[in-house]
């Protein structure tokens, strides 16, 4: 069989290259998408059926022929089927919530099963990675369908743009869920964007001169050059990662030799190298998968008339330059896994906030829990998240109290001395990042603490000192002392503007939320917000009669049953028609 031939070939390549089979399979699927994309891009623009069948066919080849993840396919199919059915048949305000609980619960179940009941096999692909991407797509889709049934005046600009007003066909939904360029590694994207790409509405603003083709113009613009540069970059990251594995040994970081015989400076340098080494495979996977989406046209994000250039950043998931040059942890996290941050913002953070109110403690708590369960149940994740939350808070305190010292009176223009602040910020950020990400790689509790202990928990000690300085008993005189060096505009109006600009903080990073700022947190406000939450829940219960909700579930089941009956009837008619065609219409009688 073809699958056996492919499996043997991959095994031989793995032995020859020294790359484990799981990584090799992912690379084949990522790089193998490009020739398929060339075909997909040239299918007739209006033939949506053919596009859907082609996408599903390639995805099936990846899942069964290359990766051999039959049980993994079942996992993805369960979540996809549930979302399709509940969004199509259940016309209730509870629909997106029920879908969210089911899809997230299914993901959490597989995370736990992988951790406690599965033995790690480096030759098998972990399907929870693909399920995490699918989880974002399915939960967002359910909210989009719900928004499509609500009055326009109740929706935000983002909700109007992404609302699904007509439920898609089964084929279009399956091709969206199993879109082969991003099925295993992402990126995630909105169904409305996918639908507009599928029917070519996405390219409505593109001038005719930018459309390829001589006799017959195609809607999808050329993107070969952009794709080529992205792929080259991704392959370069892969090669550096592969070569680096000969010199960077992660297990060495928690060895006795590393802990007892190496100097502190050497250990910090090794952790910096490890941190960069960890990031390389994400850089490679996300860059190549983004390039694949760009080649299909899905990465198209509009035409800039002023510069006469096409924007290709619709599905961007990583800003590598932003990560590597960041001067604070917040900037690092804002540049990392960007689609996850957008998903948490639009479908958790803002969804649990009551209409007319600002997001508060409840929204932050819900987002933190969702982010944690979405990533997994390994102890290392939580060590990194909890420590990262504290580090982000410390960074905010330093930016609030130290950064203005290095700015002119307008609050924007940098003084010559700001170069010192920037360099120190860059060095501290990179060293702190190298420390924080170790548990995210090792995942094990003891190994993570052993690595941190080998460098004397220096980041946690720095966090404790910062909290004492800016939130402890002597915080007020310390802050007052620093503020005397802040610029003081002479003009009263400018002073008010500067004061407002100083107080305005950057938004929280939602994929990796910060810890609470104790100087601004009022437990009474939190209690009040929880009381408001209980009140809003009671109002919802009073407004929605349980019998009406029960009736909606019955109507959904009845509609589903009727569709099944219609399908059975159509199948019976087709079967009967085939039999009639096979039976002679008349027989001659024998003489």
Image: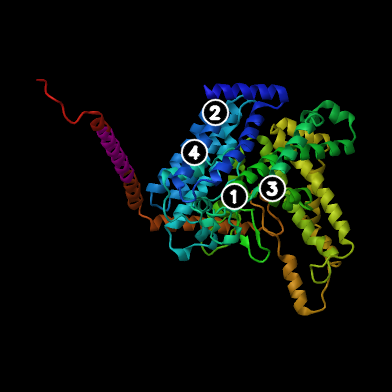
> Which residue lies at the image location 32% right of the left edge and 46% below the top edge?
559
Q: Is residue 412 above or below residue 189?
A: below
As drawn, the label of residue 336 is 3
Q: Residues within 10 Å of mark 1 (few under 14, many from 20)?
A: many
Residue 444 visible, this angle = yes
Q: Nearer the viewer, residue 151 or 236?
A: 236
Q: Earlier in the sequence, mark 4 or mark 2?
A: 4
Q: Earlier in the sequence, mark 3 or mark 1?
A: 3
SS for dot 3: loop
Residue 368 visible, this angle = no
SS for dot 4: helix
Q: Is residue 18 left or right of residue 95?
A: right
> Which residue lies at the image location 77% right of the left edge and 40% below the top edge?
276
Q: Nearer the viewer, residue 183 or 30?
A: 30
Residue 215 position within the rendered picture, expressed as x and y whole percent measured from the top left: 54, 54
Given contact means CB atoms under 8 Å apart, are the residues at marks 3 and 2 in contact? no
Residue on which disc 1 sits: 367
Given contact means CB atoms under 8 Å apart, are the residues at marks 4 and 2 in contact? no
Q: Earlier in the sequence, mark 3 or mark 2?
A: 2
Q: Which residues are magenta?
A: 558-577
Q: Residues within 10 Å of mark 4 (few under 14, many from 20)?
A: many
User: Which SS does the magenta portion mostly show?
Assistant: helix
Q: Earlier in the sequence, mark 4 or mark 3?
A: 4
Q: Is residue 343 left or right of residue 569?
A: right
Q: Is residue 177 above or below residue 200?
A: above
Residue on which disc 2 sits: 65
Q: Is residue 456 magenta?
A: no
> Which residue lies at the image location 78% right of the left edge and 55% below the top edge?
472
Viewer-nearest of discs 4 and 3 = 4
Q: Residue furthest front?
A: 591
Q: Nearer the viewer, residue 526 or 57?
A: 57
């Amino acid at each position: 069989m073809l699958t056996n031939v492919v499996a043997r070939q991959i095994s031989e390549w793995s032995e020859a290259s020294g790359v484990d089979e799981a990584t090799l399979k992912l690379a084949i699927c990522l790089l193998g998408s490009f020739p398929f994309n060339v075909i997909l891009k040239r299918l007739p623009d209006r033939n949506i059926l053919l596009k859907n069948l082609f996408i599903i066919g390639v995805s099936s080849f990846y899942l069964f022929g290359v990766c051999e993840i039959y049980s993994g396919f079942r996992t993805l199919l369960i979540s996809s089927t549930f979302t399709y059915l509940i969004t199509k048949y259940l016309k209730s305000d509870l629909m997106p919530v029920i879908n969210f609980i089911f899809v997230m619960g299914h993901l959490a179940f597989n995370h736990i099963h992988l951790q406690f009941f599965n033995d790690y096999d480096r030759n098998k692909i972990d399907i929870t990675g693909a399920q995490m991407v699918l989880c974002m797509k399915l939960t967002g889709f359910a909210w989009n369908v719900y928004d499509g049934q609500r009055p326009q005046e109740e929706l935000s600009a983002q909700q109007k743009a992404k609302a699904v007003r007509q439920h898609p066909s089964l084929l279009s939904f399956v091709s969206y869920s199993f879109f082969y360029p991003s099925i295993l590694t992402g990126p995630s994207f909105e169904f409305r964007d996918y639908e507009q790409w599928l029917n070519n509405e996405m390219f409505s603003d593109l001038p005719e001169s930018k459309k390829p083709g001589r006799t017959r113009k195609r809607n999808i613009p050329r993107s070969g050059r952009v794709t080529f540069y992205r792929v080259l970059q991704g392959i370069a990251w892969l090669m550096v990662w592969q070569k680096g594995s000969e010199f960077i040994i992660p297990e060495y970081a928690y060895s006795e030799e590393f802990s007892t015989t190496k100097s502190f400076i050497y250990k910090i340098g090794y952790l910096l190298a490890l941190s960069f080494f960890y990031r390389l495979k994400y850089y490679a996977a996300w860059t190549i998968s983004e390039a694949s989406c760009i080649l299909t046209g899905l990465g198209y994000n509009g035409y800039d008339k002023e510069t006469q250039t096409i924007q290709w950043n619709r599905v961007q998931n990583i800003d590598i330059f932003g990560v590597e040059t960041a001067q604070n942890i917040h900037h690092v996290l804002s540049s990392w896994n960007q689609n996850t941050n957008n998903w948490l913002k639009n479908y958790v953070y803002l969804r649990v906030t009551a209409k007319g109110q600002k997001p508060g403690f409840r929204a932050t708590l819900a987002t933190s829990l969702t982010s944690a369960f979405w990533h997994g149940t390994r102890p290392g994740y939580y060590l990194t998240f909890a420590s990262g939350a504290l580090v982000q808070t410390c960074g905010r305190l330093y930016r609030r109290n130290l950064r203005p010292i290095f700015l002119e009176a307008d609050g924007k223009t940098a003084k010559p001395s700001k170069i010192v602040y920037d360099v120190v910020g860059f060095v501290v950020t990179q060293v702190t990042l190298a420390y924080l990400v170790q548990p995210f790689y090792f995942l094990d509790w003891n190994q993570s603490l052993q690595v941190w202990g080998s460098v004397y928990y220096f980041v946690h000690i720095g966090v404790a000192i910062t909290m004492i300085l800016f939130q402890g008993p002597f915080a007020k005189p310390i802050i007052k002392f620093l503020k005397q060096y802040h610029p003081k505009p002479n003009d009263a109006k400018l002073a008010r503007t500067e004061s407002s600009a100083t107080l305005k903080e950057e938004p929280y990073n939602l994929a990796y939320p910060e810890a609470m700022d104790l100087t601004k947190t009022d437990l009474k406000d939190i209690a009040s917000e929880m009381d408001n939450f209980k009140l809003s829940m009671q109002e919802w219960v009073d407004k929605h009669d349980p019998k009406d909700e029960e009736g909606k579930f019955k109507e959904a089941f009845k509609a589903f049953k009727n569709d099944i009956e219609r399908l059975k009837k159509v199948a019976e008619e087709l079967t009967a028609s085939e039999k009639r065609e096979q039976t002679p219409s008349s027989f001659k009688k024998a003489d």
